[in-house]
Image (spheres, helix red, strand yellow):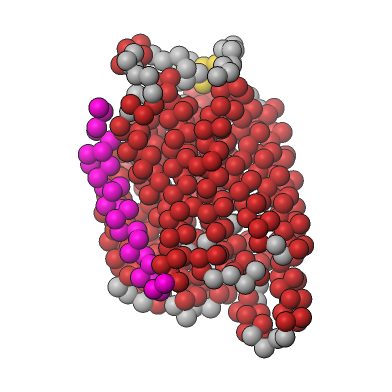
């Protein structure tokens, strides 16, 4: 395996100054904003492409599958890339790849070809896999381990503020007058319908051209920034001694179980954010109103992140935060199943509150003590983000076979496993 030679810029957490940490947190925060904006556009793309490309529920959730499956495919290659390039250049490269994915939307929209849309989403996910493989361990290692969840919570706020804005902005363009359009389509002949749907498909061209330009600009700015490297290959003496007998990242049970927890968590997070618009429509709520529901889910996550920043680790440990979040998520999931209308939709939105502190807690618990295995361990956690590909697709299948509300039973065992990991699983070391 190629190995990058250490440079004068390589720093450990101990030698990174407070001012450097602050600048780095601001830079990484801007990247998490981009993560959120691009990721949560999917919540609008699902109902939008369902109309434009005439899809059923299962087919429409291929949007989430194509986007998130790239994490499974590209996480290990991303770790190799970071070995060669380091964190900063790797992040810049990830932004360029995302820009290429955004460009693919232009021919996809012009030809109304669903497979091209999916290809663009896969490429964007590939770029995000590189970015997240770098950014998540970077922000974890940048300061004291016990306050890692707090720093990740700050990143989560950046991510979810973008997530609140993204569906509102794209929804105002892509789903404008969507309810009236759906009614008109039912009365049109094939030629008229094709013309209307072609016009609908072209609505996303301008937003994705702008996105391409912004991503390229950010790639250049990150490349030219003063973001320091953090050397994870040279461990402190305590960690090095503990890992002397370790030959594989799979010898860390807290990481393996953490990866499974991450898989299930991302799955339920994506279900809460990406299915809520379509679910609201299935409950008889107009798309003109339902298009704002994802923003409510992400707004609830922001509230949870703010709670995390204030309380972790001063009043509550990362482990306890994970346990409380898991129990709360299961209760809100049951609330969504056993109520109807706006009340049921509200419970789905509140899953955002329950989910908010799960990712910040899982990450530091899973990579604790990995030392020289940190980069490859982080790539395992990034691979686990593929839960966002698999679980929403299962949800879509269940929604077609039964109904969209009963399909939410899928989230209950996921939250139960998250409780297990927060209570017991992360303590298993052998």
Residue at far left of view? 424
Q: Is residue 44 visible?
A: yes
**In the rendering, at what x and y percent does residue 66 appear?**
57, 52
Determine the residue positioned at 70% across, 86% down: 188
Q: In the image shown, does 221 or 102 lie closer to the viewer?
A: 102
Numbered range of the magenta stretch: 401-430
**In the rendering, at what x and y percent does residue 272 appear?**
43, 60
Please give left or right for residue 248 compared with residue 169 in the image.
left
Q: In the image shown, does 284 or 196 lie closer to the viewer?
A: 196
Determine the residue positioned at 59% across, 42% down: 126
Provide the major secondary structure of the magenta segment.
Answer: helix
**In the rendering, at what x and y percent does residue 138 appear?**
49, 29
Determine the residue positioned at 67% across, 85% down: 184
The relative height of residue 14 versus residue 30 in the rendered view (above or below) is above
Q: Is residue 406 magenta?
A: yes
Please give left or right for residue 283 compared with residue 48 in the image.
left
Determine the residue positioned at 66% across, 80% down: 181
Q: Quadrant of the N terminus?
A: top right
**In the rendering, at what x and y percent does residue 108 appear?**
72, 58
Q: Is residue 144 visible?
A: no
* Residue 41, picture quadrant: bottom right
Please give left or right for residue 285 compared with residue 341 in the image.
right
Please give left or right for residue 402 compared with residue 56 in the image.
left
Q: Is residue 107 magenta?
A: no
Numbered disc total? 0
């Amino acid at each position: 395996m190629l190995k990058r030679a250490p440079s004068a810029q390589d720093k450990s957490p101990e030698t990174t100054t407070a001012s450097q940490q602050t600048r780095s947190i601001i830079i990484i925060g801007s990247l998490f904003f981009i993560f959120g904006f691009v990721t949560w556009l999917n919540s609008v793309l699902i109902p939008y492409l369902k109309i434009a490309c005439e899809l059923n529920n299962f087919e429409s959730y291929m949007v989430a599958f194509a986007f998130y499956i790239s994490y499974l495919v590209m996480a290990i290659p991303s770790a190799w890339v970071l070995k060669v390039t380091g964190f900063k250049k790797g992040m810049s490269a990830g932004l360029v790849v995302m820009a290429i994915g955004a460009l693919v939307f232009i021919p996809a929209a012009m030809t109304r070809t669903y497979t091209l849309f999916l290809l663009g989403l896969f490429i964007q996910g590939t770029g995000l896999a590189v970015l997240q493989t770098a950014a998540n361990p970077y922000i974890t290692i940048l300061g004291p381990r016990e306050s890692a969840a707090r720093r990740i919570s700050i990143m989560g706020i950046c991510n979810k503020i973008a997530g609140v804005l993204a569906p509102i902005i794209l929804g105002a363009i892509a789903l404008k007058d969507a309810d009236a359009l759906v009614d008109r389509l039912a009365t049109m002949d094939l030629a008229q319908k094709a013309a209307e749907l072609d016009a609908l498909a072209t609505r996303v061209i301008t937003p994705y051209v702008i996105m391409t330009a912004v991503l390229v600009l950010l790639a250049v700015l990150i490349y030219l920034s003063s973001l320091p490297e953090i050397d994870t290959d040279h461990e402190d003496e305590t960690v090095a001694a503990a890992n002397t007998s370790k030959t594989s990242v799979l010898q860390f049970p807290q990481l393996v179980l953490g990866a499974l927890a991450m898989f299930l968590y991302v799955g339920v997070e994506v279900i809460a954010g990406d299915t809520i618009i379509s679910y609201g429509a299935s409950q008889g709520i107009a798309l003109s109103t339902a298009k704002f529901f994802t923003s409510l889910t992400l707004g609830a996550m922001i509230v949870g992140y703010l709670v995390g920043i204030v309380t972790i680790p001063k009043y509550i440990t990362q482990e306890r935060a994970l346990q409380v979040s898991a129990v709360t998520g299961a209760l809100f999931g049951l609330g969504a199943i056993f109520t109807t209308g706006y009340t049921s939709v509200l419970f789905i939105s509140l899953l955002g509150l329950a989910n908010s502190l799960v990712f910040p807690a899982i990450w530091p618990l899973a990579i604790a003590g990995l030392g020289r295995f940190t980069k490859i361990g982080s790539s395992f956690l990034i691979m686990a983000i593929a839960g966002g590909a698999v679980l929403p697709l299962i949800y879509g299948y269940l929604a077609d076979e039964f109904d969209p509300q009963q399909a939410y039973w899928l989230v209950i065992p996921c939250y139960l496993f998250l409780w297990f990991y927060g209570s017991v699983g992360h303590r298993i070391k052998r």
